[in-house]
Amino acid sequence: MSLDPADNLVGVDLQDGWHVIRRIPGRSGATGGCFSRRYEVVGRDGTKAFLKALSYRSALRDPDPARALQPLIQDFNFERDLLFSARQNRPASARQE
């Protein structure tokens, strides 16, 4: 078992009602792939979704953690803003807010 919390989420119930089912193997892609883990989650209503868990462990071990964290935080903010924009621009019939 890894000491990195991002590696150990299978079986965890998250605060917002999602349950982590399984880890999806491989890297997450261009944004933060080395610093994230992918999971499949299921909501209370049975809805399946994707979870991207970020790990800042290696950046915090860097001699200059602030500089090492900067690109990770930029990637996080980019993805968060992209999801927010997609949520705001999807058709009203597709919204589950």
Image (cartoon, grey):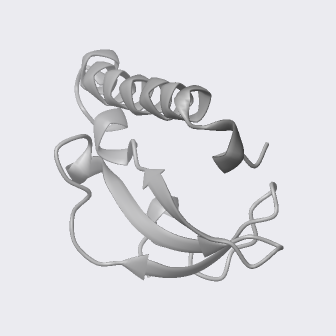
- Asked if residue 78 lies left or right of residue 20, the reply is left
Q: What percent of the width, then of the height, locates residue 7?
A: 44, 69
Q: Nearer the viewer, residue 90 or 32?
A: 90
For the N terminus, the quadrant is: bottom left
Q: Is residue 42 left or right of residue 81?
A: right
Q: Residue at x 29, y 49 (%)?
A: 35
Q: Nearer the viewer, residue 38 or 6?
A: 38
Vertical comparison of 75 with 61: above or below: above
Q: Is residue 64 above or below residue 47?
A: above
Q: Is residue 4 visible?
A: no
Horizontal side of residue 26 vs 79, given as left or right: left
Residue 74: in sight, yes or no? Answer: yes
Q: Quadrant of residue 69?
A: top left
Residue 72 percent across, percent down from the top left: 32, 30
Residue depicted at x 49% and y 33%: 86
User: Foreground residue, 47 or 33?
Assistant: 47
Front position in the image: 5 or 81: 81
The residue at the point 83 percent across, 73 percent down is: 44
